[in-house]
Image (spheres, rainbow, N blue to C red):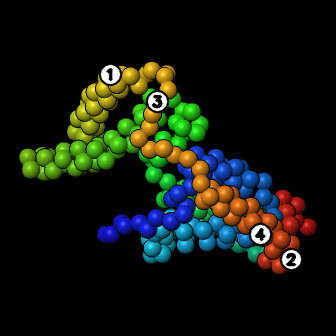
Amino acid sequence: MDFDIKETWLHKINPSLKLLFLIVLFISVLFIHNINFLINYTVSAFLLFAFFTGHPMKRILLLLIPFVLIFVSTATSMIFFGKGETTWWKWGLIHITEESFYRGLHLGFRALIFALLGLMFSLTTRPVFLFYSLMQQLKLKPKYAYSFMAGIRLIPIMIEEFQTIRQAMIVRGVEQRKGLANFFHKLKAYSIPLLSQSIRRAHRIAVAMEAKRFSNDTKRTFYYEIGFSKYDLCFVLYFIIAILLSYYAAQMLPFFPVTDVRYIE
């Protein structure tokens, strides 16, 4: 499968600014109780996610499948089993009311916009640039930043080692057991060598970092200089304008006659 990514202006945004601003957006979503506003807000986030993350639409849709399922499960659980006074349909334990319907949709769209913002950040931010930005803009100590980067680097190494151990067990004809005995046997066979290798590798990295004076608090130079650009302003302005337009559209052209899902008359 081809994983080539076309770099867009979202990739050029300062990672620290992107992280902090998206955290603010995450928190702001928690205080949106107008379902019409939230739907418009979700659409604006989806447009940015779909057309400016640099991934083909097919891959975008594949990435969204699990979150769409979360949207459906979250919304339906509230719609079918939520509380309310205006009953639309009732059958056994299922009780759909006007209040539960709107609250279910609101909860589903809230989960969906969280997913869109999170995926947007992860797909357009390189971890190396993020930690360099945290060191330069937010003054994160290099020993913590490089420790995180080393941890991320260890993940594909551990996956490769897991595959090596698995192939070695197949070549040696290790007997396959049944039931829980097989599960605990595999857990022991894989976890012990992986854990021991990880501890040794982490120790070597720690010694190397100490030797290179990562614990020193003196001013450092950086291979990557991360700064601010016009794209940062474009990113902030996009969401400010999107929020204002979403609110205006919710007032002028609402999808549902509800302004606050907490108080439905």
> In the figure, residue 34 lies in which quadrant?
bottom right
Sequence-first disc among 4 and 2:
4
Q: Examine the rendering and report whether any part of residue 201 can be seen.
A: yes
Residue for badge 1: 211
- Residue flagged by tag 4: what amino acid is it? Ser
Q: Position of residue 258 (x, y in %)?
A: 85, 70
Q: Residue at x 55, y 72 (%)?
A: 51
Would you say 63 lies left or right of 39 here?
A: left
**Which labelled disc corresponds to residue 246?**
4
Quarter of the figure that contains the C terminus = bottom right
**Between marks 4 and 1, how big is the CA–CA gap?**
54 Å
Tell me if residue 135 comes above or below residue 176 in the rendering.
above
How many neighbours does mark 1 have within 10 angstroms: few (below 14), some (14-19), or many (20 or more)?
few
Q: Nearer the viewer, mark 4 or mark 3?
A: 3
Please give the name of the residue rendered at 51% of the width and 65% of the height, measured from the top-left corner: 8
Residue at 72% x, 56% y: name it: 29
Discs 4, 3 touching: Cβ within 8 Å? no
From what the image shows, is residue 159 above or below residue 92?
above
Q: Residue tagged by mark 3?
A: 220
**Which residue does the image show at 8% across and 46% down from the upper left?**
172
Q: Are marks 4 and 2 in contact (CB under 8 Å)?
A: no
- Tell me the kind of residue under disc 2: Met
Residue 143 image point, x, y percent: 44, 28
- Depth-wise, is mark 2 or mark 1 nearer the camera? 1
Q: CA distance from mark 4 to mark 2?
A: 10 Å
What residue sits right under mark 2 in the picture? Answer: 252
Q: Residues within 10 Å of mark 3 (few under 14, many from 20)?
A: few
Q: What amino acid is labelled 3 in the image?
A: Arg
Closer-to-camera residue (258/48): 48
Q: In the image shown, does 226 or 178 lie closer to the viewer?
A: 226
Q: Which numbered disc, 2 or 1, marks the residue that appears first in the sequence?
A: 1
Q: Mark 1 or mark 3, which is nearer the start of the sequence?
A: 1
